[in-house]
Amino acid sequence: MTAQSQNKILVAYFSWSGNDKVLAGQIAQETGGDLFEIKTVKAYPGAYNACIDVAKQEQNSNARPALSGADTNMGQYGTVFLCYPNWWGTLPMGGGGTFLEAYDFSGKTIYPLITHGGSRFGRSLDDIKKLCPKAAIGEGLSVSAFDTNPKDGTRVTAPNRDLTAWLRKLGI
Ligand SMILES: Cc1cc2nc3c(=O)[nH]c(=O)nc-3n(C[C@H](O)[C@H](O)[C@H](O)COP(=O)(O)O)c2cc1C
């Protein structure tokens, strides 16, 4: 594998209620990266309370929910944006453990983007480091779910200016 063949950008995202999907789309648009949705085989409940119960159970049992969809050809990427919501203080188990253990991230740089309801990054940066010990973890961005569109509760909208500023700062 030559260095040149690893210079592409992957924008991987997990999103239950849409916020991370919106921001991942913005990253892909601004960087020219490939968008990749991390999806579990078993869909999470659509109702909030049911979803938080399932998410808590998965976290308590350190679950690795199976992912659906095509494998991404990770070898071609040197830069990976990982976009995920804060679920109970860290990444959702499918967006975190299952996805991050499925690939070899050595030599790659992961830039975390989290959306949250107040807890910012929570424990997620430490958890990413533990799950991907061979990756470099670049500066992350946390975006409040209430940031950009307070009238609509927890909906973020794009373009998000903090996100654009972050990409400029990263030089990507
Ligand atoms: C199962 C679940 C657990 C959550 N736990 C937290 C939490 O611990 N801390 C927090 O700040 N926000 C928490 N939230 C709020 C989400 O992080 C926030 O709404 C996020 O922007 C949703 O992203 P999405 O639309 O891409 O799914 C939780 C939401 C859900 C559905």
Image (cartoon, grey):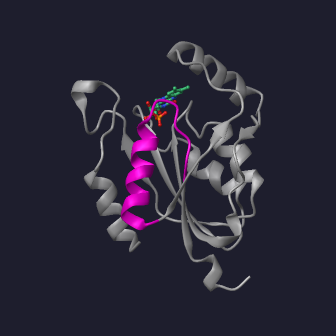
Q: Is residue 134 magenta?
A: no
Q: Residue at x 63, y 77 (%)?
A: 6
Judge by depth and name the residue closer to the eye, 92 or 45: 45
Residue 24 part of the magenta-drawn span? yes
For the N terminus, give its image quadrant.
bottom right
Q: Is residue 117 above or below residue 1?
A: above
Give percent across and percent down for residue 30.
Answer: 36, 63
Say which quarter of the image contains residue 151: top left
Q: State the residue in front, 60 or 28.
A: 28
**Which stretch did the figure color magenta?**
12-32
Q: Is residue 87 left or right of residue 143?
A: right
The answer to whether residue 120 is seen in the rendering is no
x%, y% of residue 132?
A: 70, 59
Task: Return the x and y of residue 86 as percentages of the image width and height.
Answer: 51, 37
Residue 34 vertical position relative to residue 151 in the rendered view, above or below? below
Evaluate whether residue 30 shows in this view: yes
Count of picture labels:
0
Residue 73, image x, y percentages? 70, 63
Q: 100 or 138, which lies in front?
A: 100
Predominant secondary structure in magenta? Answer: helix
Residue 77's place in the image compared with 91, above or below, is below
Q: Nearer the viewer, residue 88 or 70?
A: 70
Left/right placement of residue 105 relative to residue 18 reads: right
Q: Quadrant of the C terminus?
A: bottom left
Q: Residue at x 46, y 30 (%)?
A: 17
What residue is shown at x 62% (from left), y 17% (from top)? 53
Q: Residue at x 71, y 40 (%)?
A: 68
Image side of residue 15 versus residue 99, left or right: left
